[in-house]
Amino acid sequence: MDAKTAIGAAVDAMYAMVSGPAGPRDWSRQWEVFHEDARQMRTGVDGAGTPWIKIMDPASYTADTAPFFAATPFFEVEIARRIDLLGNMAHVWSLYEARNAPDDATPERRGINSIQLYNDGQKGWRIISMIWDNERPGVAAERF
């Protein structure tokens, strides 16, 4: 499998793990997709507009999101992807929309994932770092 296909498969598997009807998620592929030392970072702003970040390893992410997924149908769909690759590292910009049902006309939220992957030569391309943020009023994507 070429690098672009393998990187894409890891990103696709990440989306598949978090998407589904309300209820527990199947995390059985997590260690195939995420490096054991990976970090997942959720960012946002509080009610006063102050930025915050929550940094988690894969096990912490699973524990942190379990109550949300148990109670909430959540279908996250990638709507655009850009991959940059050099040597054993890759960076993926992945824009997404989240819906409460796959056929909802309007997304519940939109955002962007910045995903870094590492290929160790044995286990292939796995996510080593991921940070994301959701769109919100007054914040527009910019490209310089």
Image (cartoon, helix red, strand yellow):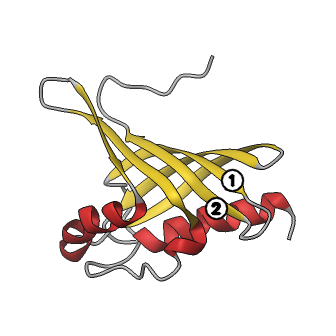
> Residue 96: x and y, percent?
49, 51
Q: Earlier in the sequence, mark 1 or mark 2?
A: 1
Is residue 63 or residue 80 the one in the foreground?
63
> Residue 17: x and y, percent?
46, 73
Q: Is residue 119 left or right of residue 96?
A: right
Residue drawn at x 30%, y 67% as measured from the top left: 100
Residue 106 sits in which quadrant?
Answer: bottom left
Neighbours of disc 2 within 10 Å: few (<14), some (14-19), many (20+)? many
Is residue 29 or residue 35 the one in the foreground?
35
Q: Residue most toward the right?
A: 2
Q: Residue most toward the top?
A: 144
The Cα–Cα distance between marks 1 and 2, rounded to whole angstroms, is 6 Å
Residue drawn at x 80%, y 63% as measured from the top left: 121
Kindly identify which numbered label has been placed on residue 3: none
Q: Secondary structure at mark 2?
A: strand
> Residue 133: x and y, percent?
39, 40
Up the image or down, 97 lies above or below 63; here it is: above
Which quadrant holds the C terminus?
A: top right
Which quadrant holds the N terminus?
A: bottom right
Q: Secondary structure at mark 1?
A: strand
Is residue 13 or residue 130 the one in the foreground?
130
Up the image or down, 10 lies above or below 134; here it is: below
Amino acid type of the residue that numbered disc 1 sits on in the rendered structure: Tyr
Amino acid type of the residue that numbered disc 2 sits on in the rendered structure: Arg
Q: Is residue 24 left or right of residue 131?
A: left
Residue highlighted by disc 1 = 118
Residue 91 sits in which quadrant?
Answer: top right
Determine contact: label 1, label 2, CB under 8 Å: yes
Residue highlighted by disc 2 = 126
